[in-house]
Image (cartoon, coloured by chain):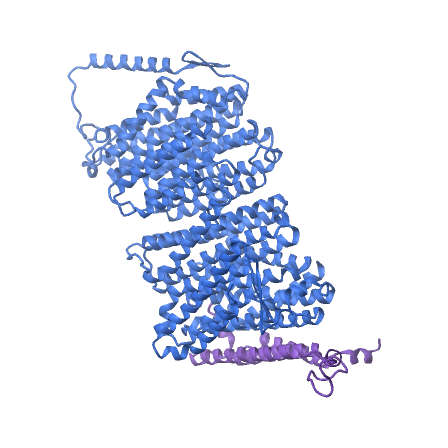
Chain colours: A purple, B blue
Amino acid sequence: MSILEFVSRINPVAASGAVLVLVGVWGVLARPNLFKIAIATSVLETGVNLVILSTGYIRGRTAPILDSAADASTAAARMTDPVPQALVLTAIVIGLAVTALQLSYAVRLRAAGGGSSIESYGDEKW
Amino acid sequence: MVNPLWLFALSLGAAFLLPLVDRLGRRIALALVHGVTAAWLAAGIFWLSILLSGGEAMDFGTAGFMAPLAIVLRVGLAEAAGVTAVALTGLLAASSLTRSLRDAPLGGSMALLMVLMGLSGIVLTRDLFNLFVFLEISAIGTYGFLGFDDRKPALRAAFKYMIAGGLASSLYLIGVIYVYRLADTLNLDIAASGTALSGPAGTAAVFFLLAALLVELKPFPANGWAVDAYETAHPGVSAILSGASATALLLALWKILPLLGPAHLSLVAASGLATFAAGNLVGARQDRPLRMLGYSSVAQVGLVAAVAALARLSGLGDGGSDFAAMVAGGLLLNHLLAKTGLFLLAGAVEDDRARGPLSPLALAAAGILSAALVGLPPFPGFWAKWRLVRALADSGRWWILALVLGGSLLEAFYVFRWLGARTKGEAGEAPVRLGIRGAGPVLAALLLVAAGTLGGIRGPVPDLLLWAPWAAAAVLFLLDGIPGRLKGILSAAAAAAFGAAVWGRLDGLGQFFAVMLLGGGALFSIAALRKGGARRGLYPLLSAATLALGAILAARTPLEFFFAWETMTAASWLLVLRGRDGRKPALSYIVFGLGGAFLLMAGLAAGGWDGGTAAAGWPGLLVLAGLLVKAGALGVHVWLPGSYAESDDESSGFLSAALSKAPVFALFALALSLGAALPGGPWTSRVLGWLGLATALGGALYAVYQEDIKRTLAYSSLGQIGYILLAFAAMDQAGWTTSLYLALNHFLYKSMLFLAVAGVIQRTGTRNMYEMGGLIKKMPVSFLSVLMAIIALSGVPPLSGFGGKWLLYSTLIGKGWYLEAAVAFFASGVAFLYLYRLIHSIFLGQPKPSQSEVREAPAALVLPQLLLMAVLMAVSVFPRLMLDPILALVGDRFPTTLAFEGSRLRSALGYWDGTLTMVVTGGVFALCLAWMLANLHNPQSVRQFNIVFAAERPLRPETTHYAWRFFEPYRKALGFLTRERAERFWDAFGTGAASVGGALRRLYTGNGQTYALHVVLYVAVLYLLLGVL
């Protein structure tokens, strides 16, 4: 298989999702700022969401909406898989809640006089 | 059955209504929260009752559809139990949370509702994506709940928790979507029934699901974030996290087990076992109770996960899912209740910064919860651990067995260290009363007792007689307020009644030991009457220990025996702990006690009991080793002196005179089950003989240099047990006769010594011999008792000890063990030194002025001594009283070398006639006395200082009564033998284990990003391992 063929087989959505996942993990591990960690988590989740979406996509098929392009009898053969889209919606909502909560904790920690780097919150150890 | 959807609607509706209801008052809002939790609990119990009475598990679809079209919730036995457990933990935690929830913003109450609902959802759902949703609901609820009362450390910990949680949920999502992609379904059962997931891609997809769940289960080393949260959060929150959350997540893991291949299962098992070992190693280094409980928590969860995986992986315990459910379920139930209770209790105590001892009820709860956590009987963990050990032994997984028992021992060490510190509190502080916050721990303790007792009685130990120790302890504890003397009589009566009930089913050996064990318990219960007052805790424990000794004799199966054995260990440990400075000795007592018990357990589980071929091999040797630890053989004796010395004086006597015979009994029973042979062949007997000899010599040497009278007696007991072991090891008729004779003799004279010494200590208020002196006139009966006892102990004619020594040397010489005989003779000589000192330093010499008011010991001590003196006299004059039953017991198992002719006992070497000895000695004594009286002219009574010493008339007793460091000159000659090598060895061993724990805990740096890195690396390593497996 030539390189071009290999590249063309890569699902662009999944690939960009994977890149975002890696970026997110890197951010969580390497950026000490509390807010950046929260944002990195969000990036990570977005990447995962893209990966989820990519699995529902089937080449050459139409959107999973019952209209002139596909009616109920032919839906299974002509539509992409709607389930991952439904799942991703739920995941997005949950991700939003987690990000909001994480940011609010960061704000509370800062407001209580703590530093903005996670390294200053290591009192509990061993 | 109730459709669980209603309950979800109820929780969600209540959470949304809460801000409105709060306008009516926070109490009403909280009542709503508790009401909803109670509704979940009621539903759970209702489901359980239906399912346990034969109902079928039911699936509930959503939106009118069933799988695969819709999410399905299942109510089966595991699910019903899980929902019950989650709601129960929520309600138990309410007792400590309510006050904080009232003062905190309303979000805390809403978060509590959401956490519990999310956890119940995790338990109920059969849909993989729905499982994710519930995981996230409970996670978000937990994040909020961790910081609800705005304590700063908890906020910090919650942030770290969120980072790890975010990584775990991303992993889960990736896993779930590829499982869907490959299996075309999100329903667990449909996915598990197909083969779509068996390929490499499926394995990887399932791995991601599994990794996420494993991370949520807080594996080593990716669990720092969780431990930080356990330590810092409100204890009620920690209780819910450790109890309810762990239960739900373990059930989630249980649920996806059918998806897992062998490689996955191996990962779960390895990770779980590593977590168990590491968690306990690190926990042992903790001095902060909540963090310690956190480590213990992750360790326990690791064990449960490992058991579940092993059972499925390799058919551990016949491979039935029944085994996994019973063992993993039992361990989980145990962990759930014990850890919830302990977190609530420790949290309440820590919150108050209280340093005093606990109030009795709180103390009882703490004791029950700790004992349950460690897996002592009769709690569910005990039964589960027994089955687990048995299955591991059956399948030959020795490494895992050693790891499980070693980890448990470490856990016992640190949990009991904490309990000991809490029991004692700091001097001068007021007792800690918990009030309403005690409700949760007490309730958890009661549930543990109920679950364990029911599980035991309806399961492996239906014999109610074996439960008598627990019943006695419970009854006497409830009556603990009544006058102590009444309880003492009750305790003695319980021992007598138990003896009467059990007598008929004991064989000769059992009856012989019952006299010592139960009789000793009754004797020292009576002796305890010497002091008035409630003496809280003493009688319940003394009675429980006594009856447990009886139960050991009456046990018929290995499990029954081990059950009674651990009951005895636990009760006697608490007796030691009760002593004034009993904290440290009690810790080493229980650690060595349990160490021995675990060796015993491994041996019993491997078939070291039933006399089969296994018992003759190393399972039998394991049993033997366990018994030797309990007997205090030299090298593993380090627990003994401190515990005998520091416990209450009557408890010391009980431990030394009566309880120390339990391992002797078990040794005989073990040998008898093998047809009067030792496991492992002739070398065992040789090694055991020398071990006994070393113990005899070591005990005597150590005893010589003590200043503390009770330590002297403790080391003396050690030495005497050594002789018993030595004679037992001879494995012939003379040896066994000697061994049993020495055992009974030791019981008699050591009881007398401890009773007399208890009186002396009570009257003089000191245990140092050099602070006593000249008590002969003030305490004549005690003097006579000590005199007779040391004559009997040292083996001087005419008392029974002479017969013992004669028998011993006859045995050794007859056996050809000449060197042993010589060393034994030397040890007897050494023993004479400390025995002489008992008389010289305490009763003879110069009375101390401060002790001029000393009176004879109380009647409760004197009367038993008089009785024992009479018995000792009788068996000395008529040795056949004692030897006939013993010879009958030993019977014709060995070639006969000993036989009576009239009052003469004849061996191959000669004969001994106890009656004649007594007559001759008495005659010589009478002649001398008569001569002295006849030649006594003008006797004069001598006053204390009516002496001249080196041309000087001393005026102070110290200058005339040389008593301190009495045998110091001998130290130059023999001191090198008494360096405390065993103590140093075990100290070094402890230091080694502690430094491993210390090194491991350096992983937990407190930095949230390090913790995140641990999670990532943990998953990466597991993934790589998956490739290898």
**Quarter residue B996 falls in:** bottom right
> Can you give x and y, in whole percent of width and height, for residue B278 in the image?
55, 57
Considering only vertical position in the picture, is B907 above or below B639? above
> Can you give x and y, in whole percent of width and height, for residue B34 in the image?
40, 68
Please tell me which residue is depicted at 43% across the width and 79% down the height of the picture. A113
Considering only vertical position in the picture, is A79 above or below B564? below
The image shows a total of numbered marks equal to 0
Question: Viewed as shown, does residue B843 lie left or right of B565?
Answer: left
Residue extending furthest right?
A1
Instruction: Between residue B27 and residue B918, name the one nearer to us.
Output: B27
Question: Is residue A87 at least partly visible in the picture?
Answer: yes
Question: Viewed as shown, does residue B440 lie left or right of B936?
Answer: right
Image quadrant containing the C terminus of chain B? bottom right
Please tell me which residue is depicted at 26% across the width and 33% down the height of the picture. B961
Question: Is residue B972 at least partly visible in the picture?
Answer: no
Instruction: Between residue B1009 and residue B14, name the one nearer to us.
Output: B14
